[in-house]
Amino acid sequence: PENADAQDEEKHWRVKVYRLNDEGQWDDRGTGSVQLAAGVAPTILVLSETARRGEKARETLLASRLAADADAYAKQGENIITWDTRRGDGGSALHDEGAALESACVALSFQEKRGCDDVFARLRAAAATFAERGGR
């Protein structure tokens, strides 16, 4: 259909968030929906599927500032995107006390291949535009 691209752009794809720990194992940080949030500092945002008990807002699983390098994002197989981000850059999944300047490898595992393809293409395009603006 003609409006399928517009629907994909608005869709928040279902993903699992992982972070590579110090022992080289992937820690599952939860399941949620991913979106690219525009603004002063474009951000990859993943909100949990449900709110915690007694809370109305969904938990932020990941809030990673967009890298100004399209090659920073790698696709692994058909449904995984990985990249390095700074710990403590605004996402509870990456917040480690005393490690704000350390790098952390994160991964999004998509339920649907189409979602992975869509977000990967939009990430690379947004990163290229962000780089053209000097990372601002």
Image: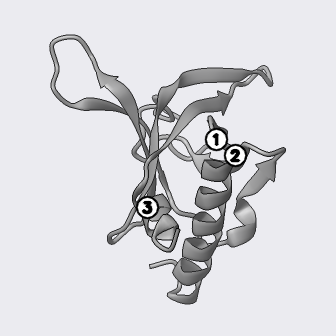
- Tag 1's secondary structure? loop
Q: Residue at x 65, y 51 (%)?
A: 114
Q: How far apart are marks 1 and 3 (CA)?
A: 15 Å
Residue type, numbered disc 2:
Lys
Q: Label 1, on which residue? A: 112
| Camera-nearest residue between 87 and 132 | 132
Q: How crowded is mark 2: few (under 14 residues within 10 Å), some or many (20 or more)?
A: few
Q: Which residue is drawn at 15% across and 26% down?
A: 56
Q: How crowded is mark 3: few (under 14 residues within 10 Å), some or many (20 or more)?
A: few
Query: Are the residues at dot 1 and dot 2 in contact (C-beta closer than 8 Å)?
Result: yes
- Tag 3's secondary structure? helix
- Report the label total: 3
65 w.r.t. 135: above or below: above
- Percent across and percent down for residue 134 are 53, 85
The quadrant where residue 111 appears? top right
- Percent across and percent down for residue 82 are 71, 47
Labelled disc at residue 7: 3
Q: Label 2, on which residue? A: 113
